Image (tube, rainbow, N blue to C red):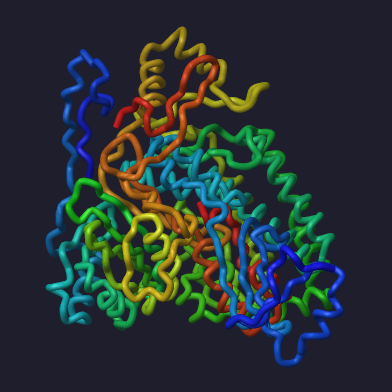
Amino acid sequence: MSNAGYAQERETTEGKVFTVTGGDWDSIVSGHDPLHDERIVVNMGPQHPSTHGVLRLVLEMEGETVTEARTVIGYLHTGIEKNIEYRTWSQGPTFVTRMDYLAPIFNETAYCLAVEKLLGIEDQITERATTIRVLMMELNRISSHLVWLATTGMELGALSMMIYGFREREFILDIFEMITGLRMNMAYVRPGGVSQDVPPEAVKKIREFLGFMPKRIKEYEDLLSGQPIWTARTKGVAVLDVTGCVALGITGPVLRSSGLAWDLRKTMPYCGYETYEFDVPTQPDGDVWARYLVRLAEMRESLKLVEQALDRLKPGPVMVEDRKIAWPAQLAVGGDGLGNSLEHVAHIMGQSMESLIHHFKLVTEGFRVPPGQVYVPIEAPRGELGAHVVSDGGTRPFRVHFREPSFVNLQAIPAMAEGGLLADVIAGGASLDPVMGGCDR
Amino acid sequence: MTQPEGLFGVSGSGDTSGFGGLVRKRAVVLEAQRPLGGDFDEIVDALEEAYPGFADAIERIVIDRGELTLHIVPAKIAEVCRSLRDDASLRFELCNSVSGVDYLNEERRLHVVYQLTSMTYRRRLRLECAVTVADPHLPSVTEIYPTADWQEREAYDMFGVIFDGHPNLTRILMPDDWDGHPQRKDYPLGGVPIEYKGAEIPPPDARRSYR
């Protein structure tokens, strides 16, 4: 076979460059000393099934051992932080909900809590709205952890786990659809409250979920915990201790799996979490196995929280009373999706001039937020999600920055991967539970 | 901060309402005076004791909406962070976030904002440094907080702030060959007009809007 048109084989400072044109594998292998020339660079991603979105890992290998790992991100950068600066404050949730697409409710809540703090209306948020936020966040935490369990199971060879994980997540997404009108990217939490009330059918469906879910979690545990392949792939793999976690800024289940019970819901409570009864599960070992146990236990704690939130759900308004901030419409799910309810349209068009003015002003101009800056952190499924929001007193955010746990946590990949096996890069990376939509924003 | 003029912030639009001459005054957040109240006095006193160059390093102290912000002289930021992390009465072990804000109308318009947490004392603190576009240099804190690595790269990528001493200050979210720093306020959002049902919808940054 002719090699015309291909690069020539040559020696470079980085090692020998081979030209492979097909059918010549034997001749290449025979000219290569496997014992003393084993250093290769492997490009994993950006489109690899176990990179959780478009993440690229550049791995320098010696045999099966990773000597250097570098993470390349940015493939999913959509300029959300820049775009928000050109929209009104109440349009913000529509953007931020699309960052970490597995935990949309958390993005919205962090943003809305920050806007409410800037407005100084935290005390006016109704109890029902706060309880609904907690309820939705905890359901979302379960669905996010389920995706983690499902995809990690798949990556480490437990394919049935994937099917079960997505099955239960689908049930939660159905609940979300019933409440918000959408399965994902709901923009449900709005500055001042939530976009619409929880319908009674949804409460029934959540009760049904609470009924079967503990048994299902037990099933996952039975499926995986005693499984020799699962334990071999997770125990003692990708260890990160507390010092390493804090230095690298890692929070959430990964930090708790190394023994530090740092959970913002307990340590710096918000949304009334201090009044709920729940535990912060920790594990001492800091390996993938510990992260698996912590996430399973967190799902159980979230179920407790969902139950308590449901019990507290007392009838009442879900938006602040201030008509100059509250989004005017009662939204309803119609045949063509979510929109203004017919009663609301009839009300503003035929009955109340005031309501029409408020609706028009809020939709076209939006509300003004007093100048200043706040940083509001909440405990998302992946760790601390912080919203740094700056206002210049106008109708649009001056700057919105999200401290995204996926972004910060991914920095741990070199620390966990270097010196380990290639297969453990997958396990370690998966155990961080990165979501690239959130990481790149 | 920008001082918006006119009702819609648009000039030459043939506005005859008279609102076009409107200038909206915006309040500025003022410097806080001692005593600061709450934990804040303890934090500032402890820092004063732990860091000898305190008086030269702190530009002003701001308390707003229950959050403490120390404005730091850019050249001193790494030293201040070291004291904040290591001193037994401060213990800000965790650097949550490093990000930029572009205050277009200020002389030192590029601000770098650090959010720190003391896990020991359960306190939060914000540090802020302001640099100019002509000389956007300040020391990197990666040696003290390794987690600042990517976040400083993002601030460089988005705002063009240069962190001296950073091990690998390259773009992180934008492509390597990108021109300009997208999050700066004078960097346009971009976009093209879209035709929808016969009408032309301008791109978001060119739409008429209240500011």
Q: Can residue B133 be seen in this view?
A: yes
Q: In which quarter of the image is residue B122?
A: bottom left
In-front residue for pair A436/B188:
B188
Decide if residue B33 is on the left or right side of residue A13. Answer: left
Q: Can residue A284 be seen in this view?
A: no
Say how many tags the image has: 0
Q: Position of residue A167 (x, y in %)?
A: 78, 50
Q: Where is residue A143 in the image (x, y as percent from the top left)?
A: 67, 52
In-front residue for pair A139/A92:
A92
In-front residue for pair B88/A406:
A406
Decide if residue A255 is on the left or right side of residue B166. Answer: right
Residue located 62% across and 57% down the image:
A54
Q: Position of residue B152 (x, y in %)?
A: 39, 65
Residue located 33% across and 72% down the image:
B140
Residue A261, relative to residue A386: is it above or below? Answer: below
Residue located 52% across and 76% down the image:
A260
